[in-house]
Amino acid sequence: MKPIVQNLHSKGIICINYLDDFLIINNTYEGCLCPAVKYGWMYLKNFEREKFLALKLHNMRYSAYMLLPSNTASAFDYVTEILGTPEIDLFASKDNHKCHRYISWRRDPYAIAVDAFTICWRGYFFYAFPPFSLILRVLQKIINDKAEGILIEPLWQAQPWYPLFNKLIIKGPLGTTPTGGKNYPGSREIIREAFRLRKVPDLAIETILQSLSEGTITQYGSTYRQWWTFCGKIGISPFSGNSTHVIIFMQELLDSSSNAFGTFNAHRSALDLILPTDLANDVVLKRFIKGISRIRPSRPRYNFVWDSRQVLDYLEKAPSTTLKSLSQKLVTLLALTTAHRMQTFSLIRVCNIRGADVGFQILISDTMGMSHLIFLFAHSIEQATNVILGQRRQWPSANRIAER
């Protein structure tokens, strides 16, 4: 509040603030209106979140600048997108009304009426954000007039009017963020909801999900679970975060974990899928990720070299009396000579093993990141069999390849 008070004082506005209470003194009603009032309570709530995040990003330095994201005033849009567009604002003024038609609390030349309790609410799909002291009276008015609309009220479950409010709910309630204190729904459902919010048809969403492998969705789930918790903590929607939120999220993970660069790069890819911001081309985020690559470079998968001769000696001495033992020898030699993963070997089909001009060609036809070909070089079937049976010294070229 300090920079706000200083700014008001510089404009000659007398103001007094104590904790969360704020008083502006002036000769007229208009002079007492803070410029931020016209945006409404929901805007101020989001604005305060953005201000808190900007201060945290700049080490609580009040003199720093902050960029106001375009989605700061989107809380009202979020509510109306889910519950419908209201026709009239029952408790408003010319400075903060959400609908073209509104009713004011005192005389207003632009309002259609004064004091919402003096007219019938039936027939209107209303929007009401009344003073909290009037909530019980509002609920009674809704019952008497058999009205329907959107009511904004605090989550005060201990209040005497709260049970009555619960009985009147048709759809909702919605929290100030889409998490609303809900449990983490799972990575697949988060991806679905992100595309629903982009107006993508449900049938098309299922097709889009097919573009992601089960492994990718599972990997993204780790990111989404942490992101869900982070968004609930700072009070933003998991589907409307911007690059600033992502940077703070990653900085907290950087400070609290020992994860390497690859993990953070995966976080960026996962969040880029569900957020409206183009994270892949955000200049500041790209620089931030590059900084992480310097601080936490990716570690090599293996940090030592072992002698493959031990394995080859074992295979030479091992019996080859069963089909299982022959298959194990074959797979081990293929692993040594081709450096493919076990996933690839598990997809080998006998029908896809073909003889080539030099050696054999094994086609991996199952869906993977890309199609794979495995070549087993041998001048004849006999030579390939000899290698598998342990007579590797009769095939010096294979021996050299294996020992690499």
Image (spheres, rainbow, N blue to C red):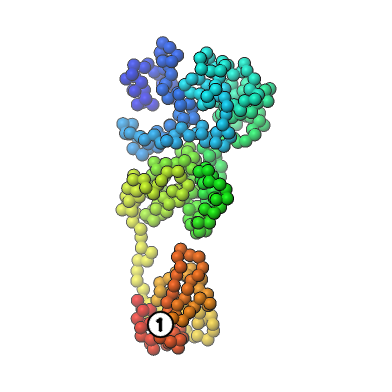
Q: Which amino acid is tagged 1?
A: Val
Query: Would residue 119 appear left or right of 291 to someone viewing this image?
Result: right
Q: Nearer the viewer, residue 294 or 394?
A: 394
x, y percentage for residue 348?
50, 73
Q: Residue at x 57, y 50 (%)?
A: 203
Q: Residue at x 54, y 38 (%)?
A: 180
Q: Residue at x 41, y 10 (%)?
A: 27
137 lies above or below 156:
above
The residue carrying pointer 1 sits among few (fewer than 14), some (14 to 19) or many (20 or more) residues within 10 Å by Cα, namely few
Which element carries disc 1, helix, strand or loop? loop
**Circle 1 is placed at which residue position?**
358
The answer to whether one can see residue 365 in this image is: yes
Quarter of the image with the C terminus in it: bottom left
Q: Residue at x 47, y 73 (%)?
A: 363
Q: Nearer the viewer, residue 157 or 101?
A: 101
The quarter holding residue 311 reads bottom left
Q: Nearer the viewer, residue 353 or 6?
A: 353
x, y percentage for residue 263?
41, 54
233 lies above or below 134:
below
362 lies above or below 76:
below
The quarter holding residue 81 reads top right
x, y percentage for residue 217?
50, 55
